[in-house]
Image (tube, grey):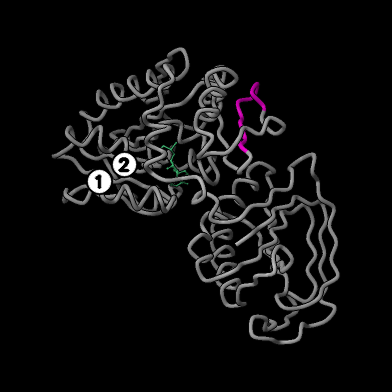
Amino acid sequence: MEAEIVYCKKFYARVVKLSTPSRCLTPEELTSNNQHVSEKNCLLVKVQCQDSEDLKYTHLLMNDILDRAERTQVTNIVLCPYGHFTNKRGSKEILIAIFDTCEEQLRNHGKNVKRVHFGSQKAYGYDAQEEILPTSRRSYPYIKHFYTTKRYIKLVTNNSLVFFQEYQRNEASYVLSMIDHYTSIIDIGSGYGRSYEIIQPHIVEKQYVGIENNQEMYINAVKTTLSHPHHKVIFCDALKLISLFPNQKNTVVLCLQNTIGVFAGSTEKFLQMLGLFLREPSNNACISFLKQSSLATEGVAFYESIKSISGDIDYQYSDFKTGTINMTNGYRSHWYSIEEVRKLLVHFNRTAVFEEHEHHFFLTFK
Ligand SMILES: C[S@@+](CC[C@H](N)C(=O)[O-])C[C@H]1O[C@@H](n2cnc3c(N)ncnc32)[C@H](O)[C@@H]1O
């Protein structure tokens, strides 16, 4: 699957002529909704699929759409079939299945979705707002080309940069000192199971649920919890926190290794969820952040050292002062400052407690 995401002020598409039906191209039914589509202030998502494998990677495309929507604060999304990226075209059924999934999930995230007709010549036009959001194009699955758990462990977990080793050490002792006080642990963005392996010997009598929305990570994490009856990892979006755990008590939510800074989807919505979760006084959270002021120095060295899994640093679209780094393969990370986090917590009814270190800081609540 290949997709391009464009931010436009105005978009229109009008069906001019239905394509001649062939083995791989049967036009979908023409309706008043897809015959003529126009939208303002929207993300245009042009998608071409190649084979049934593509369905497996819809969540990666979704992550990208939600990420771009958050950056531009856009709620209107236009899904548009696009047959011009390669000669290898997938079937209508697969593309429609991908669009159905995206449409449903985008609506669940409060987006308005319109769909352009599949299987026709169209007249269409749009004005891309490149200075607000550069158009991005990528093939899915992009991670597969770079990411393997073995490589991730070698480059990230076993990274030899002193600042990162210190981060892992301090984070581990911080988390271990917290979890003792709770009977359940929810690990948001549990990754391939790194943090689980650290805390596992200390939580044998407790409940543990890891939540992970990246398929490769999830598949590896599942193996780590298989032997324990009260420990599991689920493959889903962390935004489901409240619907999955509506009456949870005595639980600590972990969000480690700057997961908030690489969160796929709306970080703001996730924090709203967390705020609701923390209305129960016996619950708590333990969140670890990499520090904004260290991004230009330690951060750059770190991303240079892991570029075979995350791509090169895209200097043009990174802003070290405000803490955002973008990679050429679309990976993005935000490093926060304590002041910035404080502002995000204004609606929490709990008092934030920060533990500050040179290049990272931890947050928990009284
Ligand atoms: C920086 S990694 C940290 C992994 C792990 N917590 C650790 O300490 O090793 C962030 C993880 O969060 C996951 N993630 C990001 N957004 C998510 C979301 N909306 N729902 C579930 N997992 C998410 C990513 O796939 C990734 O595995």
Q: Main secondary structure of the magenta part?
A: loop
Q: Is residue 157 above or below residue 15?
A: above
Quarter-wise, where is residue 169 in the image?
top left
| Image x and y of residue 22, in percent | 68, 86
Q: Are marks 1 and 2 in contact (CB under 8 Å)?
A: yes
Residue 193's disc is: 2
- As shown in the figure, which amino acid type bears the numbered disc 1? Thr
Residue 358 appears left or right of 317: left
Please state the extent of the stretch shown in magenta in the rendering.
319-327
Quadrant (top left, top right, bottom left, bottom right) of the N terminus:
bottom right
Q: Sequence-wise, which precedes: disc 1 or disc 2? A: 2
Element marked by disc 2: loop
Instruction: Residue at 70% x, 82% y: name it.
Output: 27
The span from disc 1 to disc 2 (Cα, nearest Å) is 6 Å
Instruction: Residue at 42% x, 41% y: name it.
Output: 276
Residue 224's disc is: 1
- As shown in the figure, which amino acid type bears the numbered disc 2? Gly
Element marked by disc 1: helix
Quadrant (top left, top right, bottom left, bottom right) of the C terminus:
top left
Is residue 349 inside the magenta stretch?
A: no
